[in-house]
Amino acid sequence: MIVQTKQISWVLAFACFIFVITVACNTDNQSRSSSSQDSDHFPYTVVDSNGKILTFDQAPKRIVALDSAVVEILFAIGEGDRIVGVHNFVSFPPEASNITKVGDAYNLNKESILDLNPDLVFLFSEGAVEDLEKLGLKVFYLETLHNDFREIPESIRLWGNIVGNQQASNQIAQDFENRIKSIEEVMLKVDEGVSVFQDEGSLWTPGSDTMIGSVFDLLKLSNIAHDISGYSQLSPEIIVDRNPDIIIASYGDEISSNPAFSNIAAILNKKVFVPEEDRLSVAGPRYVEGIEILAKWVYPKFFK
């Protein structure tokens, strides 16, 4: 019995040894596999709006992001600490208020940007690209999204690829797409929407070929400014003549108190929507929230 006990103990010990070695090897293989996947992602190549090819051999660590949408995207995917400079008008998220301001697209402080020692400067307009490149900076110029909100998820994924965080960016982009699909399903119940006028201030309004124009299409709203391209200022006479059923006052209601508009349907029925935040002004992850809020306001019996 003593011999048998010793033999059993030796077998158990050997089995435990084999188990430990196997687990260690598997763990090491998994670690190497994960490391390999991370390194395999780079170099990552993008093409800017001028057709210029940029290659990222590694994720940029110090980004000057002169676009509110990019700032929101990077914070949303947990990479906001890479941003070292922003333009003067960034308002979200609150953490962005502590980041160095370097002017705006038309009045950049190039010396301040250079002092920040960025390894990437992002611009949504072309004006300062050449000047910044002459300073030896890596510049990524991509024209701002303005035609279709459905391009936002791809923009989110793009930045996930640039900073090497595809998992978080894919999750947020997929959530955006799923929420739009939910809205589309509800809108199948709506035969025809109402007419809308959006006031961006001083009667400037978006045409049908804008990002908010694509939202109106989604919500089956008839834009009274359907015959303009981009943004234009409508006369009070045209607004009265086209008599919108609802008004979206993006930055405050300046219409309800104007006697010139007292008899249009939106004013008579008190259908003026003033957004609490600028969700529908920034092409980032929050944009879908703005669409949901607007949909609930326009169709309260369909969107609970």
Image (cartoon, rainbow, N blue to C red):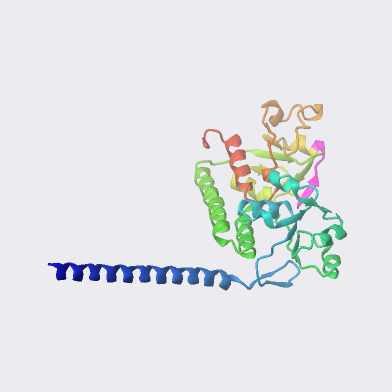
Q: Residue at x 64, y 56 (%)?
A: 79
Q: Residue at x 74, y 27 (%)?
A: 263
The answer to whether residue 177 is left or right of residue 197 is left
Which quarter of the picture shows residue 167?
bottom right
Q: Residue at x 69, y 64 (%)?
A: 60
Residues 290 and 81: in front is: 81
Please, is residue 253 above or below residue 38 in the view?
above
Residue at the far front: name it. Answer: 2
Give the residues drawn in magenta, as a range: 228-237
Q: Is residue 162 magenta?
A: no
Inspect this view and state whether residue 201 appears: yes
Residues 285 and 81: in front is: 81
The answer to whether residue 132 is left or right of residue 300 is right
Please, is residue 50 above or below residue 266 in the view?
below
Residue 36 pos. (x, y %): 53, 72
The N terminus is located in which quarter?
A: bottom left
Residue 225 pos. (x, y %): 73, 45
Q: Residue at x 44, y 72 (%)?
A: 29
Q: Is residue 232 magenta?
A: yes
Inspect this view and state whether residue 147 appears: no
Residue 259 pos. (x, y %): 81, 26
The answer to whether residue 40 is left or right of residue 115 is left
Residue 13 pos. (x, y %): 28, 68
Residues 73 and 273: in front is: 73
Residues 23 and 48: in front is: 23
Number of marks in the rendered image: 0
